[in-house]
Image (spheres, rainbow, N blue to C red):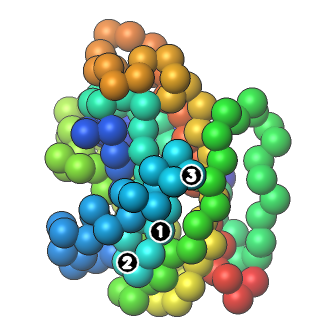
Amino acid sequence: MKGPYRFSVAENQFYVLGDGDPGHLKNRTITAASNNGLAAGGKDHAVAIAGISAGTAMISFDLSPSRLDPDASQPWEDIAEFAYTSTTETAHLAACMGPDEETDGMEAYDVDLAFAGPGDYHMRLHARGRGINPDGVQEDSEPIAEHYLLQVWPTTA
């Protein structure tokens, strides 16, 4: 398990993107994510829908060479599973407007989510706290309300 890490949310979204991914790919999965209410993925991109419109949230990563069971250690409110295909050497968490280097630190953005190299992955995003301040702004002076866990494993596992 890696994290938890602080990361930035903007426009109610955050992403997983392959290296060199053109920005227009970010919007390809937003409709699919809206269908399950949380997240969807595709080729070199995935999008997650946050509750807050802007501010800081927390994320942890569970990366495994084999299939993972859904996390039962916390009371997650939403869970979505989706496929992700990496055609590049790496994939990383990305923020819509870029990370806030003053408040985020950069650890969350450095974790390689395509850790087994190019290929197909299964991702499962767990979320809690998205209903606390819907469409609001998470102020730095307030306790962080939204927490996420992203589980990732190659589909060959």
Q: Residues within 10 Å of mark 3 (few under 14, many from 20)?
A: some
User: Which of label 3 and label 1 is nearer to you?
Assistant: 3
User: Which of label 3 and label 2 is nearer to you?
Assistant: 3
Q: Position of residue 108 (x, y in %)?
A: 41, 50
Picture residue at 62% right of the left edge, 54% below the top: 80
Q: Is residue 43 above or below residue 78?
A: below
Q: Earlier in the sequence, mark 3 or mark 1?
A: 3
Residue type at numbered disc 1 = Gly
Q: Which mark is residue 79?
A: none
Q: Earlier in the sequence, mark 3 or mark 2?
A: 3
Residue type at numbered disc 3 = Asn
Q: Which mark is residue 44?
A: 2
Q: Disc 3 vs disc 2: Cβ atoms closer than 8 Å?
A: no
Picture residue at 22% right of the left edge, 78% below the top: 20
In space, the residues marked 3 and 1 are separated at their CA atoms by: 12 Å
Q: Is residue 51 left or right of residue 131?
A: left
Q: Is residue 98 above or below residue 44?
A: above
| Secondary structure category for the residue under label 1 | strand
Q: Residues within 10 Å of mark 2 (few under 14, many from 20)?
A: many
Q: Nearer the viewer, residue 58 or 134?
A: 134
Q: Is residue 84 left or right of residue 23?
A: right
Q: Which residue is mark 3?
A: 36
In space, the residues marked 3 and 2 are separated at their CA atoms by: 20 Å
In space, the residues marked 2 and 1 are separated at their CA atoms by: 8 Å
Q: Position of residue 78 (x, y in %)?
A: 64, 40
Residue type at numbered disc 2 = Asp
| Secondary structure category for the residue under label 3 | helix
User: Which of label 2 and label 1 is nearer to you?
Assistant: 1
Q: Which residue is mark 1?
A: 41
